[in-house]
Image: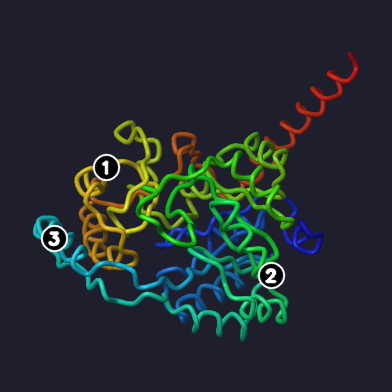
């Protein structure tokens, strides 16, 4: 990775931007102060809400940080399919004593307004999910001194990121918790994806961009593995979800290591787009029938998820988590960065000893 970008954070550890209130300023600040790159998640927030969080984060740390944006989505959903799903969810609404949300709340997540705010009030790093920004947007960010990154789940998507002029690509493996950052949601693929190590190798051969590896990483040894595979840094989400600074609901944090939740699965049940979460009742009952309709389904189920959380019912919540969720550690975020860095150093020492021993025979 370019020295200008790596100089922003001493350790090759990036805290993933987790939308929905998880990546709060306190979490990002703790990661930044410990030597990683903390991120705010602007997804599902208004432009002013994003700006206020940036102001708050700047009051907590002088270290560089990032802000993540969702790309606007094409209007490809079948209204009839969304209507059928809404009918199926009527029982959930009655159970939680709430109304279903309006699926037509908007497709663009306030993208243009957020870009305007970030150009008027530049931040060190901006990353993009669900697609690639235009060359014009990337050039505009560069002019105000902002590095631009974008997620990719295939080598083909990584090439699109490179063509945009972005500074680095976030290679997101299928192990990752939350939404897959696919540039286009193709229902026929069934949400299948490529494992992280294979993806990093493929992306490494497809583009010359620096790679940030994301997906299921919970330990420093795994960071060492992706660095050895060709990545310049690792992005961790679920690992930071359980920290006290995380804004995740207490039930969500507890579920990561709760024996009741033994596995994760990709599902459209909560948002209409493939996202990895802990398998609970809602996912089992509605996942098979949820249409490919994002963000319509997200808007539709938002009141249900909120009501389930208020009722203390984890079986009705979107419990986003990566495949390594059982390895979550309830450490303060800054301490977790330090532990990961120590594990990374130990793994590097072990690898160095192995290579030296091997060549000495």
Point out the frontmost of discs 3 and 2: 2
Q: Name the residue under label 2.
A: 165
Mark seen at residue 301: none
Q: Left or right: 99 with respect to 255?
A: left
Marks 3 and 2, how far apart in space? 45 Å
Q: Residues within 10 Å of mark 2 (few under 14, many from 20)?
A: many
Marks 2 and 1, how far apart in space? 41 Å
- Residue 110 in the image, given as x and y percentages of width and height: 44, 79
Q: Which residue is drawn at 41% across and 71% down?
A: 73
Mark seen at residue 93: 3
Q: How crowded is mark 3: few (under 14 residues within 10 Å), some or many (20 or more)?
A: some
- Residue 257 in the image, given as x and y percentages of width and height: 40, 36
Which of the marked residues, 2 or 1, is nearer the chain's N terminus? 2
Q: Mark 1 points at which residue?
A: 280
Q: Are marks 3 and 2 in contact (CB under 8 Å)?
A: no
Task: Looking at the picture, tell me which residue is in the foreground, 288 or 323.
Answer: 288
Q: Is mark 1 on a helix, strand or loop?
A: loop
Q: Is residue 122 above or below residue 269?
A: below
């Amino acid at each position: 990775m370019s020295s200008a970008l790596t100089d922003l954070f001493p350790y090759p550890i990036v805290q993933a931007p987790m939308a929905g209130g998880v990546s709060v300023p306190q979490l990002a600040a703790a990661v930044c102060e410990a030597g990683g790159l903390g991120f705010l998640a602007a997804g599902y927030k208004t432009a002013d809400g994003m700006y206020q969080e940036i102001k708050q984060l700047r009051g907590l740390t002088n270290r560089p940080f990032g802000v993540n944006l969702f790309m606007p989505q094409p209007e490809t959903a079948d209204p009839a399919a969304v209507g059928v799903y809404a009918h199926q969810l009527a029982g959930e609404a009655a159970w939680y004593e709430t109304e279903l949300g309006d699926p037509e709340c908007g497709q663009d997540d306030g993208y243009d307004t957020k870009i305007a705010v970030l150009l008027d009030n530049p931040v060190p790093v901006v990353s993009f999910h669900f697609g690639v920004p235009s060359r014009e947007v990337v050039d505009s960010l560069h002019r105000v001194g902002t590095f631009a990154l974008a997620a990719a789940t295939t080598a083909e998507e990584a090439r699109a990121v490179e063509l945009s002029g972005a500074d680095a690509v976030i290679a997101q493996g299928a192990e990752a918790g939350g939404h897959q950052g696919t540039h286009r949601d193709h229902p026929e693929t069934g949400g299948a994806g490529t494992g992280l190590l294979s993806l990093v190798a493929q992306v490494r051969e497809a583009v010359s961009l620096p790679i940030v590896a994301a997906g299921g990483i919970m330990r420093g040894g795994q960071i060492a593995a992706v660095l050895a595979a060709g990545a310049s840094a690792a992005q961790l989400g679920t690992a930071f979800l359980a920290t006290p600074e995380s804004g995740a609901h207490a039930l969500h944090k507890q579920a990561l290591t709760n024996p009741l939740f033994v596995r994760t699965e990709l599902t459209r049940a909560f948002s209409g787009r493939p996202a990895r979460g802990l398998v609970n009742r809602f996912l089992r009952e509605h996942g098979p029938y949820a249409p490919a309709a994002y963000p319509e389904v997200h808007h539709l189920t938002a009141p249900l998820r909120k009501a389930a959380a208020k009722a203390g019912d984890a079986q009705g919540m979107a419990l986003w988590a990566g495949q390594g969720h059982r390895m979550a550690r309830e450490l303060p975020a800054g301490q977790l960065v330090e532990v990961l860095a120590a594990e990374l150093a130990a793994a590097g020492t072990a690898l160095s000893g192995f290579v030296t021993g091997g060549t000495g025979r």
